[in-house]
Amino acid sequence: MMKKKLPIEIETGFEFDSYTWVLKLLRYFSPLFRKHLYQVTYKYKRNEAVELNVIDLLKSRSVFMAGFDSKQFDSIENPEDLDLALENFAENWLKEMLPILYSLYNTKIKLNFAPGSRLLSMSKFLYSAKNQKEVFYPIISDWHEEYFEVLSKKEIWKARLINARYSYAFLAAMWQKSPIGDLIEFVVKIAKK
Amino acid sequence: MSNNNFPKLSHKEMLILEMLIGKGEMFGLEMVEASEGELKRGTIYVTLQRMGDKGYIESREEPRSLPEIGIPRRKYWATGLGQKVYQANLKALEFFNADFALGGAN
């Protein structure tokens, strides 16, 4: 099987009039979707025919979509059901964005790993589902909250800073949840007494 | 009667319970921002998990609204037990401080 590489970029043309590209992407990457978090970003060129308020709306979301998890697809085994689930997902996802995307041309769409994706994969391997749910997922959730907020303002340097800060925070949480971390905490507690 | 099982709270736990009792439901990130540097992004969820295990707080997932998608955020609130333990610790702290001040004055 050919190895799929990220990021990938798609350039839409004037004829762009549906979300089929998303479906193609989702189907192509469906094996990978089970393992990682993704982010979709786009760069647009202004269409002169587009009204200003649409551009304003777009500017506020020129980088959009938080990383999303493939959890919802994990239990689906039948390929046809997976196709249907992905289709529903894409349809819901683009419901609001589609009217805006219609009015663009030469839009560059990029699919990439979302920040924290690799760290989360690592923690999935090392820690229990309870720890995932109660410790690591909330960290990733906050990470994306802050990251996508500054990214939508195109503050790239700030987004990088947030990535660095949260990578450290994630590793700190992993350390705290590790048996060695627990042991050191216990020794420190005894020493203090 | 002696009670060795008095539920002593750490400074971070006191701070979290104080915020949750005062403001109701909160996200982890809101607590980090409101604590002005006392709570850290990497450790708050470990503390919250421990507090949840002890029954002091509860939480639920808050799904994101479209077009935002992603991992749902988690909202936390103090339970009845959490509020009781907080009040008991606060009273104990007040008593200790008053006693200490009295001892210091003598």
Image: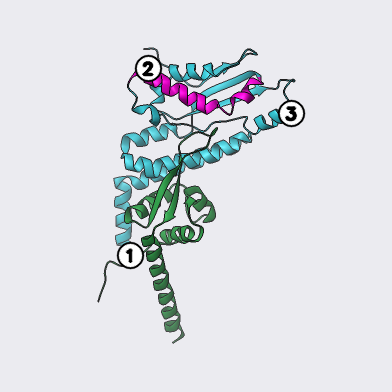
Q: Is residue A53 left or right of residue A152?
A: right
The vertical placement of A12 against B102, above or below, is above
Question: Residue A80, image x and y in percent?
Answer: 37, 17
Q: Nearer the viewer, mark 1 or mark 2?
A: 2
The amino acid beneath tag 2 is Glu
As drawn, the label of residue B45 is none
Residue extending farthest to the bottom is: B106
- Write the start and end of the magenta stretch as one range: A78-104
As drawn, the label of residue A52 is 3
Q: Is residue A76 left or right of residue A156?
A: left
The vertical placement of B100 against A156, above or below, is below
Question: Residue A82, image x and y in percent?
Answer: 39, 21
Determine the chain carrying the residue at label 1: B
The vertical placement of A189 against A2, above or below, is below
The amino acid beneath tag 3 is Leu
Closer to us: A55 or A9: A55
The amino acid beneath tag 1 is Pro
Q: Give the chain ID for the green colour.
A: B
Q: Residue B17: tell me if it is visible.
A: yes
CA distance separating discs 1 and 2: 54 Å
Question: Residue A122, image x and y in percent?
Answer: 36, 34
Q: Residue at x 35, y 65 (%)?
A: B8
Q: Pick whichever of labels 2 and 3 is earlier in the sequence.
A: 3
Closer to us: A60 or A161: A60
Residue A148: image quadrant is top right
As drawn, the label of residue A80 is 2
Question: Residue B79, image x and y in percent?
Answer: 39, 58
The vertical placement of B51 against A29, above or below, is below
Q: Residue at x 27, y 66 (%)?
A: B5
As drawn, the label of residue B7 is 1
- Quadrant of the drawing holding the C terminus of chain B: bottom left
